[in-house]
């Protein structure tokens, strides 16, 4: 997939269409995504990441999850390969699982780390090792967005995507959420400068910055303001990265698709009643529109799809 050159030096363009797949494509053609996350009480996070990745067409999906939640995840994801990892007494991934994690890193074409993972010194150490060892794009989200990762991101020789919401951005920069919201573009620029990563600053008017260029997403609505929608987005961007998209386009397409799907769901069930399940159902309809060459107007669908 290729993009047009941006006409404004301060911004980049996100195409409104997705190209068709090759007729002889197979599951190995469309990327291998490894997701490391989940914990007791947060087994939904890896399932939502998987749902987002599946909806954008990732070929193969492997979920690294603590052994303690295997049954919960397996019951709803028969298509995913589950990598059972050693668990701590708290039901989180243990650092002792590093060897199995590294095996999956060698298999993957992209990795998502953080959703539902939990917070601890061992999990921070595990996140740092993943960033150091992964020879492919890594998306860092949720619990793995710790200030100590920024220097490691700067040293990486492979792409990194950070997807903080305002609270996580405040944690990364050591400031208040109010300061982030008062100057979102400034905060975004600081995060990019500190990490040399592609950064997605979530919220109303999600911003993406990559190598000094910015994309401001104008799709979406307050129905996204609920737990789980960020996990879906992480899976969508991760799935696009696994398929070989550049961090810039993977992030831009991800946030656009995510917002458009929320707009479809809003028209079907409203903003308040819109759950992540409606969101996942609507992604397929938006992807269909974007696969139709030259189709525009995704932010104003003429009819809502069944969800």
Image (cartoon, grey):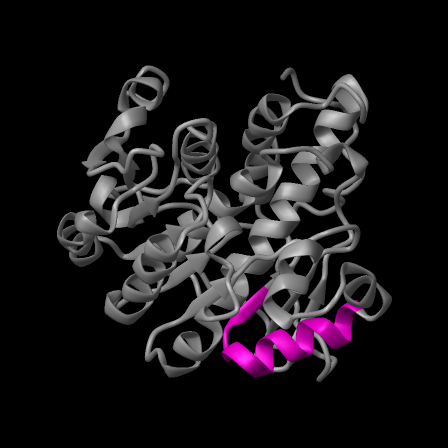
The vertical placement of 238 against 198, above or below, is above
Please, what is the dominant secondary structure of the magenta stretch? helix
| Percent of width and height locating residue 147 | 52, 69
Q: Is residue 75 magenta?
A: no
Which quarter of the image is occupied by the C terminus?
top right
- Evaluate whether residue 223 shows in this view: yes
* Rendered residue at 46%/43% (across/down): 115
| Percent of width and height locating residue 182 | 86, 67
| Percent of width and height locating residue 149 | 44, 69
* Rendered residue at 61%/37% (across/down): 229
Q: Nearer the viewer, residue 167 or 13?
A: 167
Q: Quadrant of residue 210?
A: bottom right
* Rendered residue at 23%/32% (across/down): 82
- Evaluate whether residue 243 shows in this view: no
The number of numbered badges drawn on the structure is 0
The vertical placement of 162 against 158, above or below, is above
Residue located farthest toward the front when viewing the structure as drawn = 89
Residue stretch in magenta: 184-199
* Rendered residue at 58%/67% (across/down): 199
Q: Is residue 189 magenta?
A: yes
Which quarter of the image is occupied by the N terminus?
bottom left
Q: Quadrant of residue 284?
A: top right
| Percent of width and height locating residue 276 | 61, 27
Q: Nearer the viewer, residue 235 or 186?
A: 186
């Amino acid at each position: 997939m290729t993009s047009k050159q941006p006409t404004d030096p301060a911004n980049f363009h996100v195409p409104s269409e997705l190209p068709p797949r090759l007729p002889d494509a197979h599951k190995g053609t469309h990327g291998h995504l490894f997701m490391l996350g989940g914990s007791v009480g947060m087994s939904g996070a890896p399932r939502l990441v998987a749902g987002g990745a599946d909806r954008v067409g990732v070929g193969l999906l492997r979920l690294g999850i603590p052994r303690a939640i295997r049954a919960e995840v397996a019951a709803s994801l028969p298509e995913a390969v589950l990598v059972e990892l050693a668990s701590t007494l708290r039901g989180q991934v243990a650092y002792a699982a590093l060897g199995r994690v590294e095996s999956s890193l060698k298999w993957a074409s992209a990795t998502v780390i953080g959703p539902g993972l939990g917070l601890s010194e061992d999990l921070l150490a595990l996140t740092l090792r993943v960033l150091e060892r992964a020879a492919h794009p890594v998306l860092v989200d949720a619990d793995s967005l710790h200030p100590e990762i920024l220097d490691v991101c700067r040293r990486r020789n492979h792409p990194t995507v950070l997807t903080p919401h305002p609270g996580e951005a405040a944690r990364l920069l050591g400031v208040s959420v109010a300061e982030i919201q008062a100057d979102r573009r400034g905060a975004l620029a600081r995060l990019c400068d500190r990490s040399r990563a592609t950064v997605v600053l979530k919220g109303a008017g999600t911003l993406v910055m990559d190598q000094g260029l910015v994309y401001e997403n104008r799709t979406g609505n307050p129905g996204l303001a609920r737990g789980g929608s960020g996990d879906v987005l992480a899976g969508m961007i991760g799935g696009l990265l696994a398929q070989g998209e550049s961090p810039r386009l993977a992030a831009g397409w991800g946030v656009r698709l995510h917002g458009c799907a929320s707009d479809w769901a809003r028209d079907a069930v409203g903003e308040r009643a819109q759950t992540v399940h409606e969101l996942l159902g609507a992604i397929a309809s938006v992807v269909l529109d974007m696969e139709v060459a030259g189709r525009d107007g995704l932010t104003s669908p003429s009819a809502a799809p069944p969800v």
